[in-house]
Image (cartoon, rainbow, N blue to C red):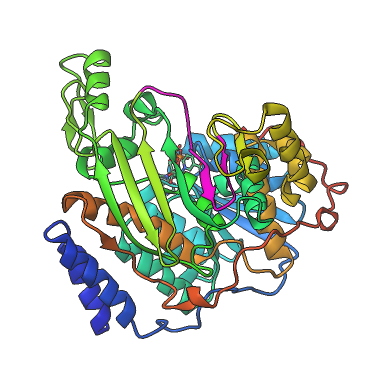
Amino acid sequence: MDKSRREFLKGTAWMGVAAMAAGHLAAQAAENRPGCAAGAPMHGFRVAPMKRVRVGFIGVGARGTPAVKRIAQIPGCEVTAISDINPVRLDAVQKWMKENGYPAPKEWSRNGDQDAWKGLCDSDVCDVVYSATPRPLHCPINVYAMAHGKHVLQEVPGAFNLEECWATVEAAEKFRRHCMMLENCTYGEEEMLVFNLIKKGKLGEIVQAEVGYQHDQRSLQYNPRDGVFWRIDRHMKHHGNYYPTHGLVPAGRCLDINRGDRFEYLVSMETKSASFEAFGQANFPADDRVVGVDGKPFNRHTQRMVKGDINTCLMHTAQGKTLSLIHNVCTPRPYDRGNLFMGTKGIYRSYPSLLMAWEEKIGDGGAHKYFDEAKAQKIKEEYRHPFWKVAGEIAKKVGGHGGMDFVMDLRWAYCLQNGLPLDTDVYDLATYSSIVELSERSVNARSSAIDFPDYTRGGWKTAQPFTVDEIDMGKFDFSSKPVKGGNA
Ligand SMILES: NC(=O)c1ccc[n+]([C@@H]2O[C@H](COP(=O)([O-])OP(=O)(O)OC[C@H]3O[C@@H](n4cnc5c(N)ncnc54)[C@H](O)[C@@H]3O)[C@@H](O)[C@H]2O)c1
């Protein structure tokens, strides 16, 4: 292990003691890292066009099974392998594949062996591993799959602490494989609309974004479908934002994070914990007893959480922008990702409503003057992102969060089939996933500022900003493989 890495790890072990020093250590280690572990930087990384993309799935639960159905329908993609420790899930996928006329994928893990997914990675039946497993498996799968020659598409967050982020970056650099985080909201119709508006200059220079993930999951987390409590486990044991990416990654793309700008530091603050406790007392008997993922029993009636109800992070970028990020999965409220962007010429907000105003409406003193609904809809049509123009109809037919999941899948498939770089790379996966640990460190240190590691090692300064690209849908021969629809 090189010296800078040892220093860095010392920094993470020191979590929560003195934030000023910890933040300084993280920055120092990032600056000192001597370059890639064993390969070239991954910005703009591409591989030869893959006319046939063979995909192996690890984890075919709530996320993985609909993904199998979507990817099986993409021309040029084949689902050739599946791994899940739950045979019921394997059976359901095999049944769907058979009923819809697709060849049976090869299976791993039917016997419940927790490590059998490695056999899928060792095999030569797939080129790409699509991982939709519980979060503790994400980094082990990233590293092992890339070491065995597979490109990785990883669910969110792509890693769970700084050590896992570095391990994933180093594996991608060493083994020269793609490792993309499957941040589906980046491909949402409204997220792509605001991206297009920003790239066309309608909002001027963006100075602040306010995003997040607010989704009442009290029932989901306390009543998991398989009886496995991996979601609530983090809540019970750690502070910080452990699920940061849904609002964040689309906003990071608008802010050119890792491509001309970078997150420098964050501060994070948390409320007390109250809502899970109230829910537990109201919904479970006093003698409730379930077993957590660590094998220890707990009682949902009396269980206390470490994480507070609402975590808020504020991030500062090298180019002087700020981004606020909220995480709240336990107060009773409608779903919300925020999606608020403010620039030198205007404002955009969506979720729940579509609100826009820029200079033609507000002039220089325009309180309460958003465009009316009809005008907002007109702008939405005019500036619909090219991805959605060409793929929107088919994506809505196939489905997955209103079609955005299918737009995302079409996009990475298109990039792989045509030898293009993927939209987000391993540095993005690491940067955004870092917030899990950085936010916890900040909360533990009375909201002191904590530096982000620079996984690009300065490469962000020269990396090309995102552009508004087009999928040439003509390259997908849907006539040879008409979509069936219904991924859920
Ligand atoms: N992008 C999104 O919108 C979104 C939404 C929900 C969840 N997620 C992410 O997707 C991932 C999966 O979430 P989910 O809701 O599908 O969970 P889930 O519990 O429904 O599915 C996980 C599956 O992994 C299987 N599994 C567990 N250990 C395994 C092992 N050792 N080998 C093989 N299979 C194993 C389980 O049997 C299960 O079928 C999580 O990382 C979560 O953060 C993303």
Q: As drawn, is 436 to the left or to the right of 298?
A: right
Q: Which residues are magenta?
A: 332-350
Q: Is residue 341 magenta?
A: yes
Q: Which residue shows up at 81% across the image and 57% down it?
A: 472
Q: As drawn, is 162 to the left or to the right of 253?
A: left
Query: In this rendering, does residue 101 appear at all?
Result: no
Q: Which residue shows up at 28% across the image and 72% down it?
A: 27
Query: In this view of the protein, which residue sits in the foreground, 272 or 41?
Result: 272
Q: Which residue shows up at 16% across the image and 50% down it?
A: 446
Q: Quadrant of the N terminus?
A: bottom left
Q: Quadrant of the C terminus?
A: top right
Q: Is residue 302 magenta?
A: no
Ligand 1's quadrant is: top left
Query: In this view of the protein, which residue sits in the foreground, 317 or 169?
Result: 317
Residue 334 is situated, as x and y percent measured from the top left of the image, at: 46, 24
Q: As drawn, is 173 to the left or to the right of 436?
A: right
Picture quadrant of residue 94: top right
The answer to whether 309 is drawn above or below residue 242 in the figure is: above
The answer to whether 107 is drawn above or below residue 431 in the figure is: above
Residue 224 is situated, as x and y percent measured from the top left of the image, at: 37, 29
Query: In this view of the protein, which residue sits in the foreground, 28 or 149?
Result: 28
Query: In this rendering, does residue 266 appear at all?
Result: yes
Query: In this view of the protein, which residue sits in the foreground, 366 or 44?
Result: 366
Residue farthest to the left, as pictured: 17
